[in-house]
Structures are given as structure tokens and as C-alpha cells.
Amino acid sequence: MALVLIEHDRGALNDLSLQALTLGRELSAATGEPLEAVIVGADGAALAPEAAAYGATTVNVATHDGLTDFAPAAWGRAIVDVAGRTRPSVVLAAGTDRGAEVMAHVAAFLDLPLAANCVEVRPGEPFELTRMRWGGSLLEDATLEGEPRLLTIAPHAVAAGEAPVAEPKIETFTPPLSDMDLAVRVTERVERASDSVSLADAKVVVGGGRGVGSAEGFAMLEELAGLMGGAVGCSRVVTSLGWRPHADQVGQTGQRIAPDLYVACGISGAIQHMVGCKNAKRLFVINTDRDAPIMAQADFAIIGDVRQVVPALSAALRPS
């Protein structure tokens, strides 16, 4: 049996969990076993039908007075509790920041290895898998042993596909949590007021690097993104300079995006940044340096100063 973590934020589903469910269903089918899901927190219970739509025959919903928001160790303890009762052959989650953190706790609790960022999994004795290493700069072939096998699936490595279950079983349980399990948890949120499209959902992302020149220089990127119905991102050096908040950072230590079009303005293309935008369908680069590393990945490029090219693009897109 495969057990999949359904990740959510106060009841808002992370769509990458649907990719994890799809992989879990494929692994279950290969061994003739059922697929089960685990959702942590009462506010995630409404997602049970969604899990069933992607093949989960049983949805285990963890409820506890302390599970009012994200708590990585507590989420891990809930998964361990379900695994102890259901004896899955594999436990997996999406390779998000939360998924990786929770599964690391599961691995520590069970004293088992964890294979992170898998792009291909072949069940057997042992499991054979391919996973991303060094920020996605190389692929590693490896084997995974243990009972159960623990892994995370790299974002967008598997296309989500529905396979509805007619009458899924909903199991509600209360995991045994200690004060230590709840020592690290979200207790308060300060949301940034914004009407713009989020980086995670944007079909177009306009990213800026050091070549933009200043924090004020991002105004022209905001205009271009607005005209294209997109969002603005940035490189790590930009956040280090204090020009943009960390929430806008695209890269290995920032957000990983998958837009239809990524417009990279004044970005050199360090490997850490390319990890964050590698799933963009098209890469359009604007840079004065024709030898910048990002040029090797570009589908389209303009060799020029972003402070001249971007306003010209906006002028061409602006309604007359």
C-alpha cells in the first residue's frame, strides 16, 4: 500500500500533492495494492473528495487541538501513526519545502532513509529511482531500501491525472502528540497585502536581477508583468541587496516556478536560480552579456540594457 501526504495551507490544497497522489497510484497499481492518503488538521478534511478523485481509496484525516496550523514534527508524527496501523510499503509527499520537512521528521522517527526529489521511481526489491542532486544540476540513479520506503517527488516530475474512487473511506483519528511535537509550529501570520498574481500560479513571470540596477528599477518590471497578466520575481542577489522581499525570490532557496513564459531581466543565471525556473516552458532573456550562463538555456534573447528594452516592450504592449 502507498500512503501519500496531502499538503495544504489552512485548507488550501497544494496542487503538487496531486502529482504525488498520481505517483502513489502508479506505485500501488504496480504491486496490486490500494492507495491511501493522509491529511493533517480538521481544516483539511474538506480535501478528502479531491484525494479520492486522484485514486485514494481511504483518506486518513488527523485531528487534534494542537493542529491549528502547520507544525512539521506533528504532521510527521501523524503520518507515522497512520503508517503504524496500515503498514504501507511506501510513504511519499510532494518535494515542497513543507513536504521535505515533514518527511525528514518521518524518517527520523522511523530511523529510515529518505530519498528526496525523485523524478522517477521503479518499484521492486529494492526500489530503483532517479533523483535530482546538487540543486538539480545532475541526476542520480540510486536504490532505496527500508520498510516503508520514504521519498518525495520533485515538483512537476509527474503529471497529475485523475482516477476517481466511487466510494472512498474517510478515517478520522487523533495522533498521539507531545509538547515537543508541537514546539515548532506556525502561531501567527502577517500577510503581505497584494492584488497581484502569485508567483506559484502565474502563467508569466518577469524576473529581475542585479542588472535592473535598483529597487526603483523594478517599477518597470511591475508594469511589464501587469501588461502580461503576470507576476514579478527576482534573483537571490536582489533580496540580499534589499531591493525585493524574499517571497519574490526564484531559485533553490526561493520559489520554484513553472510559468508558460519566464522573462529574465538582468539575471546572469547561476545554477541556484536556474533550479527555480527550470520548469518554465519558455525562457526569454534580456541581458547585456551575450556570454551570461543563462543564455545557454534561453529560447529567446535580446542583447541589451533592461532599462531600455523593458520600457520598449511595455510601450509595445500598452493599449493605445
Image (tube, rainbow, N blue to C red):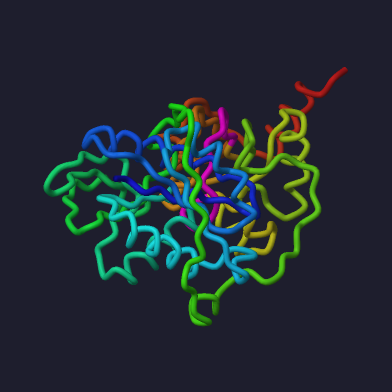
The N terminus lies in quadrant: top left
Is residue 31 left or right of 273 when viewed as pictured? left
Residue 70 in view in this figure: yes
Q: Closest to the observer: 257 or 244?
A: 257
Report if residue 209 is visible in the image: no
| Quadrant of res 49 | top right
Judge whether residue 62 is colored magenta. no
Image position, residue 290 (x, y; %): 48, 36
Number of on-image labels: 0
The single residue placed furthest to the left in the displayed view is 125
Q: Position of residue 52 (x, y in %)?
A: 49, 36
Please name the residue shown 59% across and 66% down the image.
Answer: 67
Q: Main secondary structure of the magenta part?
A: loop
Q: Is residue 30 above or below residue 196?
A: above
Direction right: furthest residue: 320
Q: Quarter of the image containing the C terminus?
A: top right
Would you say residue 254 sits in the magenta stretch? Answer: yes
Q: Is residue 191 left or right of residue 85?
A: right
Q: Residue at x 46, y 54 (%)?
A: 252
Which region shows up in magenta?
251-263
Above or below: residue 69 compared with residue 30: below
Q: Where is 98 relative to 313, above or below? A: below
Residue 300 percent across, percent down from the top left:
51, 25
Residue lying furthest top in this view? 320
Q: Residue at position x 55%, y 68% from top?
A: 71
**In the image, what residue occupies the spot 28% across and 50% down?**
90
Residue in the foreground of this view, choosing between 117 and 33 = 33
Residue 276 on image: x %, y % = 48, 46
- Depicted 281 relative to depicted 141: above or below: above
Left or right, 117 with reference to 272: left
